[in-house]
Amino acid sequence: MASPSAISRLNLLLPKPSLFTSNFRRTQFQFFATLSSRTIFSSSLMCSSYSNSSTKEFQNPTPKHNSYFTILGIETSCDDTAAAIVRSNGEILSQVVSSQADLLAKYGGVAPKMAEEAHSQVIDQVVQEALDKACMTEEDLTAVAVTIGPGLSLCLRVGVQKARQIAGSFNLPIIGIHHMEAHALVARLTDKDLQFPFIALLISGGHNLLILARDLGQYVQLGTTIDDAIGEAYDKTAKWLGLDMRRSGGPAIEELAKEGNAKSVNFSVPMKQHKDCNFSYAGLKTQVRLAIKSKKIDAKNPISSASMEDRLARADIAAAFQRIAVLHLEERCERAIQWALKMEPSIRHLVISGGVASNQYVRSRLDMVVKKNGLKLVCPPPRLCTDNGVMVAWTGIEHFRMGRYDPPPPAEEPEDFVYDLRPRWPLGEEYAEGRSEARSIRRARLHPSLTSIIQALSQQ
């Protein structure tokens, strides 16, 4: 077996995980002593964003809850290259995102090899711009956080290589981040009242996930995608309707749906017969394709060139699709709330995050479900719902406070080094009532869940 990288000590593939060993604790203290003295004398102190009071905080060599430290977050799990620098008090010092909108429009979705090349071309520039906007250099950082999964392996590799290069060159600890956990936890950055436990609905192009967040790193999976996620369904529908994909399919569908009659096309709600919280959009996509074919809509003819009659037909399909797609979310959330409250009666919030959470129709419909159950809906601002470096940096901050990070990697790594990439990485263990018997569910696991890893290491 190839040796996994040390990108994250949350890794059961190692024979003897050592996250909480005494040797690690001593190493952790030495890192902070070095990092603290480095930060006190760094060039960033000449920038107006730092005050004398904040620099004194860095003199404490242990990661106390109120100590100020600064983390660079790097995100390349799919089609956006992102970096951000965030301080431990929640201050966002910089945020940079390089979109692959043109590639999305050209290929009608994410093309992994093209996405990898696009990441490689801009990753250095994106990270440098994040540093420049924060008025910092790498020497001013306390640690580097980077997404290691789930996502596309080719894309994840670009971010991980960059993060390890920075961490190795500047002797910085490094934190491997779970992409879906980052989507959930960024809500704790934007809403200071959000405490554990809470429920989260994470909806994006590649994943649908309903979780009960009991504590940091402790998640119960209430429902997940068994085939296609809602974001992918939005993208495909937009492509088939000949819409402008430069902003991705979600915004294009939402805008066109406002012109249509949501009940003019009779689509059926997915998985009505399954009394669980899992999601399926493959069948709805098939229904959409058949409706488009019956209306003789030609995707090669862009909507900007469509006749009024053709445009109305497309708008009706968009509106009907969106209504049923979101109704599927509503039904699953309704059941998940009941399950979660049985386990944790103190729950007061439901978080929705991920790229599709930027959709105002989605937010308004789910707000009704949440209020009916006496809860409060928490939504990060749209710029923090789509993939971004802020959510990675903030999740790094949360885990860094708990001592969950790796020591600096070597400054130079061998060419045959095997990176720890986790394209299929569950966030939590399945809730017993939520296990699906659907044949199409993706059960293969390359890695144990984040929750099981943390639980196992904490018992050592």
Image (cartoon, helix red, strand yellow):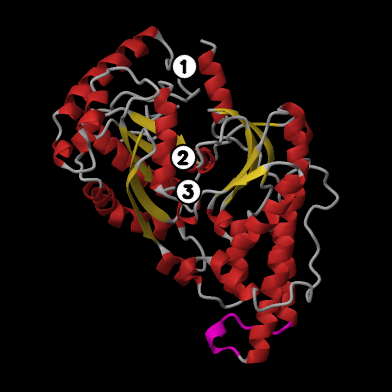
The residue segment tinted magenta is 295-306
Quarter of the image with the N terminus is top left
Can see residue 379? yes
Q: CA distance from mark 2 to mark 3?
A: 26 Å
The percent coordinates of residue 157 (x first, y second) are 38, 44
Q: Amino acid at mark 3?
A: Leu
Task: Say which residue label 3 marks.
Answer: 152
The percent coordinates of residue 327 (x first, y second) are 74, 57
In this image, 114 relative to 342: left or right?
A: left
Q: Amino acid at mark 2?
A: Leu
- Sequence order check, earlier mark of 2 and 3: 3
What residue is rendered at 29% in x and 14% in y? 29
Q: In the rendered image, which quarter is residue 228 located in?
A: bottom right
The percent coordinates of residue 27 (x first, y second) are 30, 14
**Residue 15: image tag:** 1
Asked which secondary structure carries label 3, the reply is loop
Q: CA distance from mark 3 to mark 1?
A: 26 Å
What residue is rendered at 54% in x and 31% in y? 447
Asked which secondary structure carries label 1, the reply is loop
Can see residue 439? no
Asked which secondary structure carries label 2, the reply is helix
Of labels 1 and 2, the one closer to you: 2
- Sequence order check, earlier mark of 1 and 2: 1
Residue 303 falls within the magenta-colored stretch: yes
Of labels 3 and 1, the one closer to you: 3
In this rendering, the answer to whether 63 lies above or below 198 is above
Q: How many marks?
A: 3
Task: Say which residue label 2 marks.
Answer: 189
Q: Amino acid at mark 1?
A: Pro
Of residues 44 and 442, the one drawn nearer to the viewer in this rendering: 44
**Residue 403: image tag:** none
Mark 1 surroundings: few (<14), some (14-19) or many (≥20) residues within 10 A: few
